[in-house]
Image: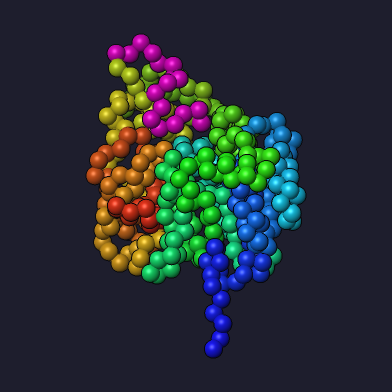
Amino acid sequence: MPYDPPFNSLGIAKPPADTRVVVAMSGGVDSSVVAAELAREGYDVVGVTLQLYDHGAALAKKGACCAGRDIHDARRVAEAMGFPHYVLDYESHFRESVIDEFADAYLGGATPVPCIRCNERVKFRDLLETAQDLGADCMATGHYIQRKAGALGPELHRAADPVRDQSYFLFSTTREQLDYLRFPLGHLETKAETRALAARHGLSVADKPDSQDICFVPDGDYAKVIEKLRPGAAEPGEIVDMAGHVLGTHRGVIHYTIGQRRGLGIGGLADPLYVVRLDPDARRVIVGPREALATRTVPVREINWLGDGAFTDRAEWELEVKLRSTRPPMPAILRPISETEAEVELLTPERGVSPGQACVFYAPDSSRVLGGGWIWKG
């Protein structure tokens, strides 16, 4: 009778020592704990850190996710735990596939989410292929999201800790990628548990602060980065109301986002005004009352569907959607137009919906992530 080996903690039918795992290490506490825990369990761990942009600029920024200091921290963890660590230069590819689109999206009046594109085009595509080339059985990351076994294959689920949940940033993970990926921290109830594990392993990053900003945007100053990437981008123009009346001038459309109230420089009005639309071609910022921000219909494209059955099997899907990473999911009806386009009807209007943001789908009364797409102007 043939021996049927039991599954290890990563769901692979091999002893840990015979299971190679590439861990994507950012230098932060989360990915460091993943690597350390897997090494402790006896897995054949290989740490990989991506150099995504110039070290000189990176070293000047504290708290960025992939800076020179973070590469150093990742290397120290690997040395302490006794597994190999490699740094891969993805700088040119990161600029082409993430940074350039970020700049162009802002110039087009959208509000992009580059962290999603980085996961989609760099970490879960190119780095994943590198992991396969290294003969790894799977790739593990420090993301707070869960991969669960389902009747039709692995499913993506929100993290156990709703505060740390990163499902909004990972909606574009494909079924094929999900087969290969592992997220060992997704079941933890609090970030304190992660830091306690880091301390137990004696890791130098145990108390390292979390990254707050986009890694290539120093101090959250998006406009400054875009002006550097696209000289002349911050051309001045008019601030107008919804009827087209000029209320003032601005110093460049890239300095404004949908829903913005402060910093418009048009005080003295009886009621507060908000940015309701951006017209980069005319170099105009259109403002209006708060109620003008309310949106009920949201056009979505580039859809990645992770639900059971084909996306176009139904005329409507009743589910929940998340339009910002900081907002809770809300009830909606999803109407497919094609396999990659749809219209989302929000049962309760939402304010400040902006092109360039993600619309992520969730199963009602469940932690399951059903995919998502990108909001556009329609």
Whole-percent x, y for residue 87 in the image: 73, 51
Whole-percent x, y for residue 79 in the image: 75, 49
Query: In the rendered image, is residue 95 in sight?
Result: no
Overall secondary structure of the magenta section? loop
Give the image's coloring scheme. Answer: rainbow
Q: Nearer the viewer, residue 300 or 227?
A: 300
Q: In the image as oriented, which residue stretches furthest toward the front?
A: 200
In reply to whether residue 259 is colored magenta, the answer given is yes
Query: In the rendered image, is residue 58 in sight?
Result: yes
Q: Is 82 situated left or right of 168 in this image?
A: right
In reply to whether residue 357 is colored magenta, the answer given is no
- In this picture, is 343 found above or below 296? below
Q: Which span is picked out in magenta? A: 254-270
Q: Nearer the viewer, residue 248 or 158?
A: 158
- Quarter of the image with the N terminus is bottom right
Whole-percent x, y for residue 33 in the image: 61, 48
